[in-house]
Image: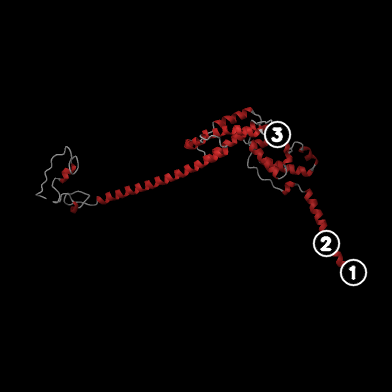
């Protein structure tokens, strides 16, 4: 009996030790498994092709890496940590492959031999960022001033305008001396962009443009774009209504002409045996005795059936009638 009870008490202890050992193994495995294996990075929607789309590409890279906790790999001193830590090197190599996949071949060929994410990031920034590049800022300003809506929708036109506005701030950055200077600069510069946006609109927005210009204070760029988009919707609805009316009128005219043509065709089927003409029967003929003998001739003269100025005098033979 004593041995049996002793064996039963030993079973829970073994299970407890096994549970503790399993937890230790899981924790150890979690420490040795690189983060890159546990998480999959979203693909960058922008393919880097050069300075034209570098700003957008770099912004997406930062957001994606930051959302997974890998933004420290972009720092210059990370190269030393990669050489000293195998797990960090595995993460670096996976991020590096992901970066290469977000580039066009013409760009990727220039950085494929680099071994760290920070090295690639720094090289591309120096080559394509062009901060304080006066020529790049001048080109953007010229494109911004001469931008026109043309055949684009208001949404597409406003998107292009905002992109140029953002790029201009990037290539010609404003360096404030006080934290409040940003708000002052934005308040001063935004009306200029709004004026450029309104000037580039199609002529069909003339009324909307005049109403905005007539206001005492400038609305924000977002409010202006919203107002123009509402006007665009109204014009589309008005055009659809007018097209519907025109289509109905065209259909009515077509049916009317078809009915007239049908009536004319039906009329030509009749033949008068009395006057030998088409268009009526003998019962409706003008040559019947109930009409004056000279009625048909009088009808052909100037002034119609009842005559008019300059008509010859007509003598009716009432006895014959």
Looking at the image, residue 10 lies above or below residue 47:
below
Q: Earlier in the sequence, mark 2 or mark 3?
A: 2
Q: Are marks 2 and 1 in contact (CB under 8 Å)?
A: no
On-image quarter of the N terminus:
bottom right
Residue sitting at x 79%, y 49%? 31
Q: Residues within 10 Å of mark 3 (few under 14, many from 20)?
A: some
Residue sitting at x 57%, y 29%? 142
Number of callouts: 3
Residue 141, position as x, y percentages in the image: 58, 30
Considering every residue shown, the one lying at the far bottom of the view is 1
Q: Which mark is residue 277?
A: none
The answer to whether residue 200 shows anywhere in this view is: no
Q: Which mark is residue 15?
A: 2
Residue 256, position as x, y percentages in the image: 32, 48
Residue sitting at x 69%, y 44%? 67
Helix, strand or loop at mark 3: helix
On the image, numbered disc 1 is attached to which residue? 3
Residue 267, position as x, y percentages in the image: 25, 50
Q: Are marks 2 and 3 in contact (CB under 8 Å)?
A: no
Helix, strand or loop at mark 2: helix
The span from disc 2 to disc 3 (Cα, nearest Å) is 56 Å
Considering every residue shown, the one lying at the far right of the view is 2
Is residue 73 or residue 97 the one in the foreground? 73
The span from disc 3 to disc 1 (Cα, nearest Å) is 74 Å
Residue 278 is left or right of residue 86, and the answer is left
Helix, strand or loop at mark 1: helix
Residue 221, position as x, y percentages in the image: 57, 37
């Amino acid at each position: 009996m004593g041995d049996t009870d002793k064996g039963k008490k030993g079973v829970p202890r073994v299970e407890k030790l096994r549970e503790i050992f399993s937890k230790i193994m899981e924790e150890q495995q979690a420490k040795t498994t690189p983060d890159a294996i546990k998480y999959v990075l979203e693909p960058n929607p922008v393919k880097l092709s050069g300075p034209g789309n570098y700003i957008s590409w770099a912004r997406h890279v930062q957001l994606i890496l930051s959302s997974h906790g890998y933004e420290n790999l972009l720092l210059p001193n990370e190269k030393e940590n990669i050489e000293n830590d195998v797990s960090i090197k595995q993460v670096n190599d996976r991020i590096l492959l992901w970066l290469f996949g977000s580039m066009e071949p013409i760009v990727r060929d220039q950085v494929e031999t680099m071994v760290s994410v920070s090295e690639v990031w720094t090289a591309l920034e120096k080559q394509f960022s062009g901060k304080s590049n006066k020529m790049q800022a001048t080109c953007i300003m010229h494109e911004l001033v001469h931008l026109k809506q043309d055949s684009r929708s208001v949404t597409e036109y406003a998107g292009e305008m905002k992109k140029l506005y953002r790029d201009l701030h990037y290539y010609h950055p404003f360096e404030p001396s006080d934290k409040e200077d940003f708000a002052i600069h934005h308040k001063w510069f935004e009306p200029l962009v709004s004026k450029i946006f309104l000037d580039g609109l199609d002529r069909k927005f003339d009324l909307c443009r005049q109403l905005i210009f007539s206001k005492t204070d400038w609305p924000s760029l977002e409010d202006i774009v919203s107002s123009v988009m509402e006007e665009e919707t109204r014009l589309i609805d008005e055009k659809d209504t007018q097209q519907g009316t025109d289509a109905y009128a065209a259909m009515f005219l077509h049916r009317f002409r078809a009915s007239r043509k049908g009536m004319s065709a039906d009329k030509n089927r009749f033949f008068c045996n009395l006057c030998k003409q088409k268009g009526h029967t003998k019962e409706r003929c003008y040559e019947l005795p109930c009409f004056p003998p000279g009625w048909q001739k009088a009808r052909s003269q100037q002034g119609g059936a009842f005559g008019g100025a300059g008509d010859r005098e007509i003598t009716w033979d009432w006895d014959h009638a």
